[in-house]
Image (cartoon, helix red, strand yellow):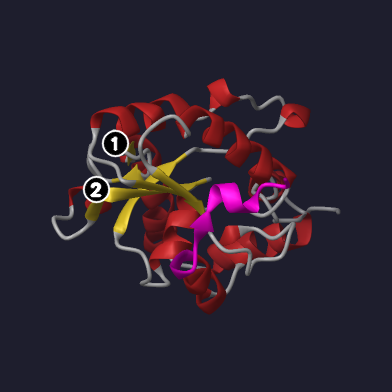
């Protein structure tokens, strides 16, 4: 791609580093910003800087938050006895949009993937175990993507939690194997949460 300006080329290069953004899309975004007013561009850039400088992660569930404890964990009407374990914040948002779950969450910030060099120590698994140990948790729901990494993570988590006196369940497989939580439609995801099953029932005997 030939550029008439080095400044334009640099901007396109930075945008193309974003996931799912190719050079053509990056160019379209940069040209859009060039057509915008200076105030609009500064507002855009300031919002990103403010986000990076001020965003927090909930000390309880590790979800992205504006405060030390996120709005979900601090909401008085949430059911503190149920924890839904998810891969990342996108999955929290997807499940919240179903309006089928009123418990709390635990964000792992990834999945176990030896091929990618991601082990249990890279995730927030130990803090989940501590929550089960020290809080009045009655049930842990695994709501992880139906793929090899998700199943590996669930198997590991089950080994860590199975000796506690709690119910361990997983969302129903209305989501096809290989599917990711964030891309599931709200009806399918909502039903998967509502019709969750004991994890032991999913194991091959």
Who's the residue at 37% across and 38% down the image? 62
Query: Which of the pair 26/136 is nearer the observer?
Result: 136
**Disc 2 designates what residue?**
73
Label 2: which secondary element:
helix
Crowding near the residue tagged with mark 2, few <14, some 14–19, many ≥20 C-alpha atoms within 10 Å: many
Residue 195 counted in the magenta span: yes
| Cα–Cα span, label 2 and label 1 | 7 Å
**Is residue 164 at least partly visible in the picture?**
yes
Q: How many numbered discs? A: 2
Do the CB atoms of the residues marked 2 and 1 lie less than 8 Å apart? yes
Crowding near the residue tagged with mark 1, few <14, some 14–19, many ≥20 C-alpha atoms within 10 Å: some
Residue 16 counted in the magenta span: no
Instruction: Note whether 140 is above or below 103 in the view shown.
Output: above
Who's the residue at 63% across and 69% down the image? 174
Question: In the displayed structure, does residue 168 sit left or right of residue 24?
Answer: left
Query: Where's residue 45, x and y in %?
Result: 43, 50
Image mark for residue 60? 1
Who's the residue at 71% across and 50% down the image? 147
Query: Which of the pair 151/118 is nearer the observer?
Result: 151
Question: In the displayed structure, does residue 143 sit left or right of residue 78?
Answer: right
Question: In the displayed structure, does residue 15 sit left or right of residue 71?
Answer: right
Query: Where's residue 185, x and y in %?
Result: 57, 74
Position of the N terminus by quadrant: bottom right
Label 1: which secondary element:
loop
Question: Which span is picked out in magenta?
Answer: 193-205
Instruction: Note whether 89 is above or below 185 in the view shown.
Output: above
Instruction: Note whether 21 is above or below 160 in the view shown.
Output: below
Position of the C terminus by quadrant: top right
């Amino acid at each position: 791609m030939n550029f008439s300006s080095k400044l334009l080329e640099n901007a396109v290069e930075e945008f193309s580093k974003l996931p799912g953004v190719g050079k053509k899309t990056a160019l379209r975004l940069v040209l859009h910003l060039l057509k915008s007013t200076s105030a609009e561009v500064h507002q855009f850039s300031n919002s990103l800087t403010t986000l990076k400088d001020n965003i927090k992660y909930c000390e309880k569930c590790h979800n992205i938050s504006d405060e030390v404890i996120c709005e979900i964990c601090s909401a008085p009407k949430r059911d503190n006895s149920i924890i839904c374990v998810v891969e990342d914040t996108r999955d929290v948002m997807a499940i919240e949009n179903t309006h089928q779950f009123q418990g709390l969450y635990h964000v792992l910030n990834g999945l176990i993937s030896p091929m990618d060099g991601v082990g249990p120590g890279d995730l927030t698994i130990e803090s989940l175990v501590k929550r089960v140990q020290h809080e009045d948790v009655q049930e842990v729901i695994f709501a992880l993507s139906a793929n090899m990494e998700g199943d590996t993570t669930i198997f590991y988590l089950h080994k860590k939690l199975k000796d506690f006196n709690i119910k361990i369940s997983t969302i129903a497989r209305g989501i096809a194997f290989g599917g990711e939580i964030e891309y599931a439609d709200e009806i399918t995801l909502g039903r998967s949460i509502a019709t969750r099953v004991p994890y032991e029932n999913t194991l091959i005997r």
